[in-house]
Amino acid sequence: MRIILIGAPGSGKGTQAESIKNRYPIAHISTGDMLRENVRAGTELGKSAKSYMDSGRLVPDDIVIAMMEKRLSEPDCDRGFLLDGFPRTTAQAEALDRLLDKLGIKLDAVVELSADDEVVVRRLMARRVCKNCGEIYNTISRPTARDGVCDKCGGDVVQRDDDREEVIRRRLSVFREQTAPLIGYYRNKGLLVTIDAASSKDAVLKFLEERHL
Ligand code: AMP
């Protein structure tokens, strides 16, 4: 199975991906996670990406496309993959098409998680993440048992630099301007499915099962 999740920041792509990952043995590829990992490890790629990420802008296409060409050629992708946060621009979608053609494979579906801006802003401002294991919390709907301490591993639970309100609003306008056009791009290819981001945390999983994917 090869699918793409598209949705505004905070629409719940990561949460939906988590339930799919637990059910299907496919590679979960999040460009945001890969880029953050490079920033943490201090790689050249991470150094080039950091200022864009901190300010809520997109990392340039050539950097992200090169990173993904390498990742999609790794052996675990033979079992299928779920792309979370890629493509985010038309240039990235076209590069992905070329790469899939070269690899001789096709996408099964592109799932759009549609969400209301104000819901997303509220959700992201309350989001917290463990610096150590990446577990995601929410100060309203899923607080940690001890303030700032991860329930799973005891690591520090913090707010992401790009989850501050002004950065969230920038990320939303970047989404509308640069990523939303992909919805039409994939609709024209007959691959698009839209799911309300407010539905249950395994709504996408249910859809995949119904389609027998
Ligand atoms: P995310 O965790 O998916 O919200 O991504 C966090 C940040 O990483 C984004 O705001 C961008 O700066 C960067 N990023 C992630 N995926 C991409 C992509 N496909 N193209 C460009 N920048 C990206």
Image: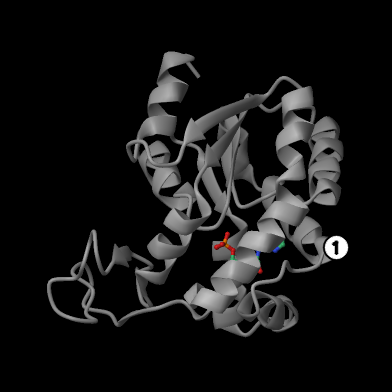
Check disc 1 and give the amino acid type: Asp
- The image shows residue 92 at horizontal and vertical percentages of 80, 50
Residue 182 in view in this figure:
yes
The residue that appears at 62% across and 43% down in the rendered structure is 75
- The image shows residue 179 at horizontal and vertical percentages of 72, 50
Ligand 1 within 8 Å of disc 1? The answer is no
The local secondary structure at tag 1 comes to helix
The residue that appears at 26% across and 69% down in the rendered structure is 139
Residue 120 located left or right of residue 146? right
The residue that appears at 21% across and 78% down in the rendered structure is 154
In this rendering, is residue 36 above or below 93? below
- On the rendered image, what quadrant is the N terminus found in? top right
- The image shows residue 213 at horizontal and vertical percentages of 50, 19
- The image shows residue 142 at horizontal and vertical percentages of 22, 61
Task: Determine which quarter of the picture holds residue 17.
Answer: top left
Residue 64 located left or right of residue 46? right
In this orientation, which residue lies closer to the viewer: 161 or 86? 161
The residue that appears at 69% across and 46% down in the rendered structure is 72
In this rendering, is residue 55 above or below 103? below
Tell how many labels: 1
Residue 30 located left or right of residue 212? right
Which residue is tagged 1?
62
